[in-house]
Amino acid sequence: MRSHLLNDTTAESYRRSVTEGIERVAAKLATTTRPFTGITVDALSPRIDGIDLDKPLLDTAAVLDELEEVYLRDAVYFHHPRYLAHLNCPVVIPAVLGEAILSAVNSSLDTWDQSAGGTLIERKLIDWTTARIGLGDNADGVFTSGGTQSNLQALLLAREEAKTQTAAGLRVFASEVSHFSVKKSAKLLGLGQDSVVCIPVDHDKRMQTVALARELERCRRDGLVPMAVVATAGTTDFGSIDPLPEIAELCEQYGAWMHVDAAYGCGLLASLRYRDRIDGIENADSVTVDYHKSFFQPVSSSAVLVRDSSTLRHATYHAEYLNPRRMVQERIPNQVDKSLQTTRRFDALKLWMTLRVMGADGIGQLFDEVCDLAAEGWKLLAADPRFDVVVEPSLSTLVFRYVPAAVTDPAEIDRANLYARKALFASGDAVVAGTKVSGRHYLKFTLLNPETTVEDMSVVLDLIAGHAEQYLGESLDRAS
């Protein structure tokens, strides 16, 4: 079995195996005509359940054949231009190359003696990102597994900086359409059920700063502590960007930590034309970025950034077997001193490879293209009487609803939209997402693929309308 260990004696076997795997994936990518096959759970489960993991196939080619059956054939392919559902981006080739390298070398980014150059590369990328944000010379941060972890760490730092004897009096303010990880983080941090105050949004789904000011004043009047305000730069459902400059002023006035969840909107940091949409982010105390959303990186690649590097001490613990305190005096850089994780992948290498091959402008150009595409999609939907579109996009998301002229029952329209989404997914012709707006079911295009065209969107809208009309026709037949 030692022949399967990757080392100097098995380098040629490694080359052959990885090449064979790459060729299989490349062939699949080249021949995939739909984002999904439409396979059901009931159809796929027996194939996987029937595999005896205690009986290995002992042959790479045979395993790849099997993998074709249980995974590659029925995977959901984000690179396809009619995958329009969640915040999943097609990935750039330099980042995939970085993924292959980091997996093979297998550095762990917790301590210098496990990563060396990897540590310095990650730190360089953190500095690059904080400079793009404008957080100042004392800024710092660390890569994380994703936006949820980044938000959790940011709120942990905010809680510790609040300097209060009890968590019961702490309050976190976020818009009613902010990411669910804000409430999840509050629960994990022991802040209690009522600690997150949801601020209403305006017509464009942006936090109402008048309402925020009112709630901050109420918090202070009630003797509570405004621990943090979470401003969102790119909400999951609408891509809306909260008014960051006004929120920053209120945070300063009330002594609240300002966190900007830019997991989605961070692509604007590289934008050639739309960077001004996140003006005010430079005032944040902490920022979440997800490179694996709008920087076209493979999952996972995220970071939490802070204005004041000293605040990261709240995540620092020392262990003699890993990062003893003496290493601080010896100026040995251990990333575990900043992170909630210990063992951690060298995910920064993917972004490094991307920047060194494509440059930031290359990333920004791709993100600008999907923002432009969303603007065209908005015009398409606004001109189509079959659909109601909610918000003109700030980024690349469109939320809409099929509204047949002959049906007035909102519940029946809900069911038609739900049916259309499920039927479309089952067909495999396209994948769209769904959400609720004011209690009603809506559909969603999340546009992160520059290869998607207005024609693609038009075809998918016709497919949605067709499925919805089929449902309504069958519903009318049943009623009669």
Image (tube, grey):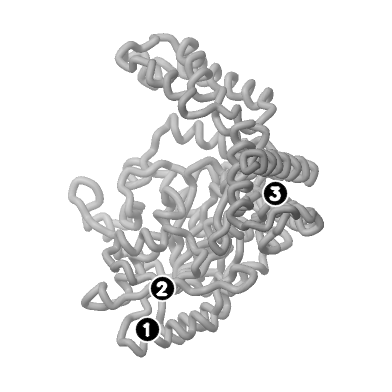
Mark positioned earlier in the residue sequence (2 or 1): 2
Q: Residue at x 40, y 86 (%)?
A: 218
The CA distance from mark 3 to mark 2 is 36 Å
The CA distance from mark 2 to mark 1 is 10 Å
Task: Give the SS element for disc 2.
Answer: strand
Graded by Cα atoms within 10 Å as few (under 14), some (14 to 19) or many (20 or more), the crowding at tag 1 reads some
Q: Residue at x 68, y 25 (%)?
A: 30
Q: Where is 388 relative to 445, above or below?
A: below
Give the mark toward the camera: 3 or 2. 2
The CA distance from mark 1 to mark 3 is 43 Å
Q: Where is 49 relative to 421, above or below?
A: above
**Residue type at tag 2:** Val
Name the disc covering residue 366, or none: 3
Image quadrant where one finds the C terminus: top right
**Residue type at tag 1:** Cys
Q: Quadrant of residue 467?
A: top right
Instruction: Return the residue at label 1.
Output: 219
Q: Is residue 77 left or right of residue 194?
A: right
Mark positioned earlier in the residue sequence (3 or 2): 2
Q: Residue at x 47, y 10 (%)?
A: 62
**Residue type at tag 3:** Leu
Q: Residue 339: x, y in percent?
A: 34, 54
Q: Residue 384: x, y in percent?
A: 79, 54
Task: Give the SS element for disc 1.
Answer: helix
Instruction: Return the residue at label 2.
Output: 197
Task: Give the SS element for disc 3.
Answer: helix
